[in-house]
Image: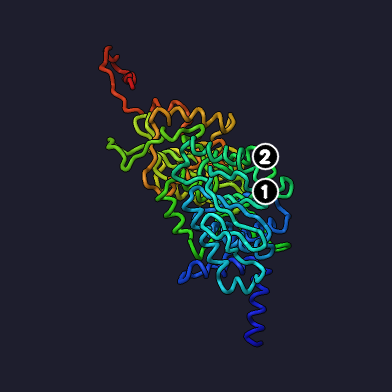
């Protein structure tokens, strides 16, 4: 094949295959960096190209930071659309003028490249308008850049792209969140050239329950959503092309080659549970907590000194069956001190089959020398109680007599009173915090169930585990009889 034929084939690929076009754009804008192909990039490309073809008019894409979303949505996609139809009018908005200008300059660099001009010879930048804020084409199409909150008087577009409408640092500002949402409703919606066929794309990482994504989904069900958490929380089949899908399993990370699980877990520890749940998992929790308030959570680094061996309680919430598609089994291990203080020492959480679960119950009970092992008497827990009776010391079946929310509401009094302490810096702390603070709106509640079961454990425990002081005898002991038991006060 000659060099000319090779170039013709390459141009044809760039014109017809948007994922290949995205890779070419990346290599143009990021020389010296390596493009890492990934299934999720194909998924994003597919949804964006559906907008270009008119199959989708309202699209939301949520994914973690540093995932190429801006290059794909704000740079490559407008260039691809205008390459096919240089009469289209596109408006691109971001949270700041500087960011909007940066994406605009990247777009200009792509359109000015030799390979783009060869692939799309009919798309040319007009000499009348070629600036950071607007790039006009000779065929009357354009890409207009603006900031969220900016004026668009007299301007309209066929496609409007909103890329990160809110800066993460502004996520907790009700004023800034409200301003962004109001701008969308009062300004942006009226800028579509055709209200029926015009398209709006929102591409962002979640930063708050009431961010633009949350606002839009609360207003209407017309939006198609592609949500891509850093770590998959459920099995999902994700479209990559017509008739082609990626089967994502629970626990799969978005791009193992670019960001393996160890790095994501390290990021989780660094940014904290709230930020990670929102920006990386696309599942923001109430900033102050829902039923459990963030301000109530207290932490410890070392246990207080006590006389004798501490009293250890383990609380199990078990899944009905093992497997990645099912709920988690959870064991929380507590150090109970003075009858009133609860120190969470360890959290084990896993999706395992029944034999492995049974072995894990015995293993953790022995490892922590548990005095009591509370087992929810339901589902697999009922069978575990029957099989492990006499084999695990202190095994106590607990029959749930109230719904989950009621049980957690009762337990929350101890957390609010400052009687519950979490181990600071533990590997499991971020997942636990996220579930506690989101409950009852959290996707999973297995850790919550284990915690509430422990804290609601029979009230006599709080009396009989306190350090007792004998009262002086106030009566003579009768001769020849066993002494009466001493009286105690807590």
Q: Nearer the viewer, residue 251 or 50?
A: 50
- Counting from the top left corner in percent of width and height, residue 191 is at 64, 45
The quarter of the image holding the N terminus is: bottom right
For disc 2, the neighbor class at 10 Å (few under 14, some 14 to 19, many from 20) is few
In the current view of this chain or complex, which residue is farthest to the front? Answer: 128
The outermost residue toward the top is: 475
Which residue is drawn at the image coordinates 59% and 46% (left, top)?
Answer: 327
Judged left or right of residue 299, residue 98 is right
Badges 1 and 2: C-beta atoms under 8 Å apart?
A: yes
Residue 125 visible in the snapshot: yes
Whether residue 385 sits left or right of residue 271 in the image: it is right
Q: Secondary structure at mark 1?
A: strand
Of the pair 313 and 427, the residue shown nearer to us: 427
- Residue under pointer 1: 58
> Secondary structure under badge 2?
loop
Looking at the picture, the colour scheme in use is rainbow
Q: Which residue is denoted by mark 2 in the rendering? A: 220
Q: Position of residue 212 (x, y in %)?
A: 57, 42
Q: Would you place residue 142 above or below residue 170 in this image?
A: below
| Nearest to N terminus: mark 1 or mark 2 | 1
**In the drawing, what numbered circle is on residue 40?**
none
Q: Quadrant of the C terminus?
A: top left
- The residue sitting at the bottom extreme is 2
Q: Nearer the viewer, residue 241 or 251?
A: 241
Count of numbered marks: 2
**Residue at point 49%, 38% (across, down):** 176
Q: Is residue 338 above or below residue 145?
A: above
Measured from the top left, where is residue 301 in percent x and y?
Answer: 32, 43
Can residue 365 be seen? Answer: no
């Amino acid at each position: 094949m000659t060099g000319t034929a090779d170039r013709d084939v390459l141009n044809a690929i760039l014109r017809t295959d948007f994922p290949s076009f995205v890779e070419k754009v990346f290599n143009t804008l990021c020389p010296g960096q390596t493009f890492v192909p990934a299934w999720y990039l194909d998924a994003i490309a597919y949804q964006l190209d559906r907008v270009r073809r008119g199959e989708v008019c309202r699209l939301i894409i949520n994914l973690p930071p540093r995932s190429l979303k801006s290059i794909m949505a704000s740079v490559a996609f407008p260039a691809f659309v205008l390459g096919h139809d240089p009469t289209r009018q596109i408006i691109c908005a971001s949270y700041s003028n500087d960011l909007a200008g940066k994406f605009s300059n990247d777009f200009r660099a792509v359109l000015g490249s030799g390979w783009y001009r060869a692939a799309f010879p009919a798309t040319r930048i007009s000499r009348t308008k070629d600036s950071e804020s607007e790039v006009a084409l000779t065929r009357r199409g354009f890409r207009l850049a603006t900031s969220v909150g900016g004026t668009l008087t007299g301007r309209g577009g066929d496609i409007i792209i909103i890329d990160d409408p809110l800066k993460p640092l502004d996520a907790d500002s009700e004023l800034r969140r409200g301003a962004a949402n109001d701008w969308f409703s009062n300004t942006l919606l009226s800028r579509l050239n055709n209200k029926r066929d015009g398209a709006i794309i929102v591409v962002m990482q979640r930063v708050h329950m009431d961010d633009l994504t949350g606002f839009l989904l609360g207003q209407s069900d017309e939006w198609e959503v592609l949500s891509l958490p850093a770590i998959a929380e459920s099995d999902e089949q994700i479209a990559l092309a017509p008739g082609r899908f990626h089967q994502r399993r629970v626990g799969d990370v978005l791009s193992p080659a670019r960001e393996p699980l160890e790095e994501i877990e390290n990021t989780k520890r660094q940014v904290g549970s709230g930020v990670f749940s929102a920006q990386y998992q696309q599942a923001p929790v109430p900033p102050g907590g829902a039923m459990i308030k963030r301000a109530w959570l207290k932490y410890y680094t070392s246990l207080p000194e006590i006389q004798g061996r501490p009293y250890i309680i383990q609380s199990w919430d078990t899944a009905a069956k093992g497997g990645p598609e099912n709920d988690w089994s959870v064991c929380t291990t507590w150090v109970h001190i003075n009858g009133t203080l609860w120190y969470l020492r360890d959290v084990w959480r896993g999706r395992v089959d029944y034999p492995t679960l049974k072995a894990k119950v015995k293993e953790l009970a022995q490892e922590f020398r548990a005095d009591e092992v509370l087992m929810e008497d339901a589902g697999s827990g009922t069978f575990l109680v029957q099989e492990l009776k006499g084999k695990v010391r202190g095994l106590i079946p607990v029959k749930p007599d109230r719904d989950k929310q009621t049980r957690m509401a009762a337990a929350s009094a101890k957390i609010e009173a400052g009687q519950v302490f979490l181990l600071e810096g533990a590997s499991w702390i971020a997942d636990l915090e996220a579930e506690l603070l989101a409950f009852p709106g959290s996707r999973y509640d297995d850790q919550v169930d284990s915690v509430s079961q422990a804290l609601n454990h029979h009230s006599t425990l709080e009396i009989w585990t306190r350090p007792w002081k004998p009262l002086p005898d106030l009566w003579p002991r009768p001769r020849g009889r066993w002494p009466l038991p001493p009286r105690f006060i807590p």
